[in-house]
Image: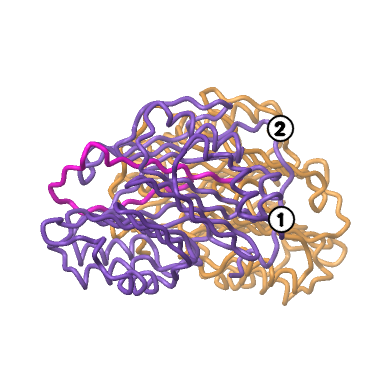
Chain colours: A purple, B orange
């Protein structure tokens, strides 16, 4: 059975003089999550942020913003519509909507261009493509308003493809527990002090939300061999730790290829292994953010045998 | 306006004791081309092969086989159906159907899995994927019959993506002539003695068929900046010339990335520029052929600015 791991992402920042999103009722977030055909599984919260684990990825809510990440066949643009209809475009200080190269875009309920056309009608803005259309890319629709992010407003995404077959094997084991998965990640020593909420899906899949004050990280794993994909995202100001944390994840999952997307996180960094940067796209001041997209490949001279295509590969 | 340059490909070899495809009436080929929503524009022929230039790519016919390559939104599987219905599966010694990573698979009339399911019902066979599903790949459905290709039965495909902006600029010039395009390719000195049939499409696009005895080469150019793509294919036994010819084409189009697919053509070769092989897939005895897929990237450390997405990009 095919599952689209590649996520869509929506981040909306509101005008804080008139709206505090932490005070919005839970029933509204339930409605918003349901609008894209997902549901809330569990939540953790502290006085600075709420983190909802969804049937398809995650929703984080702070006073001034929310971040929603959804995978599978979810229709995230419908959640955007609901929020904009309820609060109005004047309440929106910044809206950024992202989609990336999907494994099977023909199975999605809409295309990025369709989504971007709707967003442009609702809030105005600009659709950009970072990366190459024939391979890995990140499509970013952003409002085009004067906006200055705070100094600590940065995001790093690490999107890993083609994780090592042993990882797929381990992560598709039927009786796998959360504890075993977290032990396999071995990440908590590098990102200590976070409260964690995680879920093992049946038959496959794993999601994790982590909160510490206003900092989050989130991991979503689609381990199936047909289209294996693991995403990691954080707003943690990693600084010198950034290289260490990304390298750790790459050494755990040993992906054949990965993308790094930085929002106001564009330091150069080196990877432990023989990964080559095939493509880089970079732009300053995209709705106030310096956005950096990099696509890496591990050179593979020996090659592999082809894969037998299963007729179930496109079934949902 | 978007045009899908990425081709589908069908090669059928027949049992020659009972069928000579060179004697099949032109009206049948017209019908077969029309079945996938293409049409014949012109033709060249000699005593060993006929070459038809199509509104979407090419059809070549020899005594024992035909090769059909179609791009855009054509439904090549319908041409396969027509041929199989007319001549029956027992007349087919070998059938190979290929599709590759498309720029916009959601705009195609069918998916590879749908096509392969139908082929499996009609003639039996095996669907394989060469390359990685998250990036460049070649999907190959092949019959699984005892078949031994002759010694001179070999094919090389060179699929070039992201050709240099100056090439796009030149090849989208409104008043461009065939002669200027062939001069730009500067290929005839390397492949001398071929009879050539070519066509400049409006507003954009160029196709070329070339014949010399039973040898062919064919070039199809989709120069539009949004999704530039150039394919070259030949059965010419290039031998030591292979490296020279492929390198020449790469030096002309300067693609950001290219794939090389070989059928019984798996020599190693070196490219002039800093192209790195990101992925290789290789299998022996696929319906008698040794198939080799390689995906190359030019490393790009400096990066580019993102591309503004036009809302017309998905329109046909």
The quadrant holding residue A79 is bottom left
Q: Nearer the viewer, mark 1 or mark 2?
A: 1
Q: Residue at x 60, y 26 (%)?
A: B244
Q: Are marks 1 and 2 on the same chain?
A: yes
* Residue that label 1 marks: A173
Q: Is residue B286 left or right of residue B107?
A: right
- Residue situated furthest bottom in the rendering: B85
Give the vertical position of A193 relative to B190 (above or below). Answer: below
Give the vertical position of B204 relative to A80 (above or below). Answer: above
Indicate the secondary structure of the residue bearing disc 1. Answer: loop
Q: Chain of mark 2?
A: A
Choose the circle earlier in sequence order: 1 or 2: 1
Magenta-colored span? A133-162
Residue B83: % across, % down: 70, 71
Is residue A155 inside the magenta stretch? yes
The disc at residue B255 is none
Residue B297: % across, % down: 52, 34
Give the vertical position of A147 relative to A28 (above or below). Answer: above
User: Which residue occupies the foreground of this view, B263 or A61?
Assistant: A61
Q: Residue at x 16, y 68 (%)?
A: A88
* Residue that label 2 marks: A302
Question: Quadrant where the N terminus of chain B lies?
Answer: bottom left
Q: CA distance from mark 1 to mark 2?
A: 29 Å
Q: Chain of mark 1?
A: A
User: Which residue occupies the foreground of this view, B35 or A224?
Assistant: A224
The quadrant holding residue B154 is top right
Residue A21: % across, % down: 24, 61
The quadrant holding residue B179 is top left
């Amino acid at each position: 059975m095919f599952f689209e791991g590649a996520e869509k992402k929506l981040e909306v920042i509101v005008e804080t003089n008139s709206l505090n999103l932490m005070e919005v009722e839970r029933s509204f977030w339930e409605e918003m999550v349901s609008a894209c055909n997902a549901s809330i599984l569990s939540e953790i919260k502290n006085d600075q942020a709420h983190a909802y684990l969804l049937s398809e990825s995650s929703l984080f809510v702070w006073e001034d913003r929310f971040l929603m990440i959804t995978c599978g066949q979810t229709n995230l643009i419908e959640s955007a519509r609901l929020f904009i209809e309820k609060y109005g475009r004047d309440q929106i200080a910044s809206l950024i909507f992202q989609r990336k190269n999907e494994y099977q875009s023909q199975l999605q309920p809409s295309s990025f261009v369709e989504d971007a056309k709707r967003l442009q009608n609702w809030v105005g803005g600009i659709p950009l493509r970072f990366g190459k259309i024939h391979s890995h890319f990140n499509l970013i629709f952003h409002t085009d308003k004067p906006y200055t992010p705070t100094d600590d407003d940065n995001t790093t995404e690490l999107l890993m493809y083609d994780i090592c077959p042993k990882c797929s094997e381990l992560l598709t084991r039927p009786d796998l527990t959360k504890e075993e998965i977290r032990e396999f990640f071995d990440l908590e020593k590098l990102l200590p002090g976070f409260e964690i909420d995680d879920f093992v899906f049946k038959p496959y899949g794993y999601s994790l939300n982590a909160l510490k004050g206003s900092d989050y990280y989130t991991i979503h794993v689609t381990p199936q061999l047909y289209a294996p994909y693991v995403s990691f995202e954080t707003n943690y100001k990693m600084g010198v730790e950034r290289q260490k944390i990304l390298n750790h994840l790459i050494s755990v999952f040993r992906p054949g290829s990965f993308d790094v997307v930085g929002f106001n996180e564009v330091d150069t960094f080196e990877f432990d292994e023989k990964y080559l940067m095939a493509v880089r796209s970079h732009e300053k001041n995209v709705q106030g953010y310096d956005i950096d997209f990099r696509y890496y490949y591990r050179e593979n001279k020996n090659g592999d045998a082809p894969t037998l295509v299963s007729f179930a590969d496109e079934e949902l």
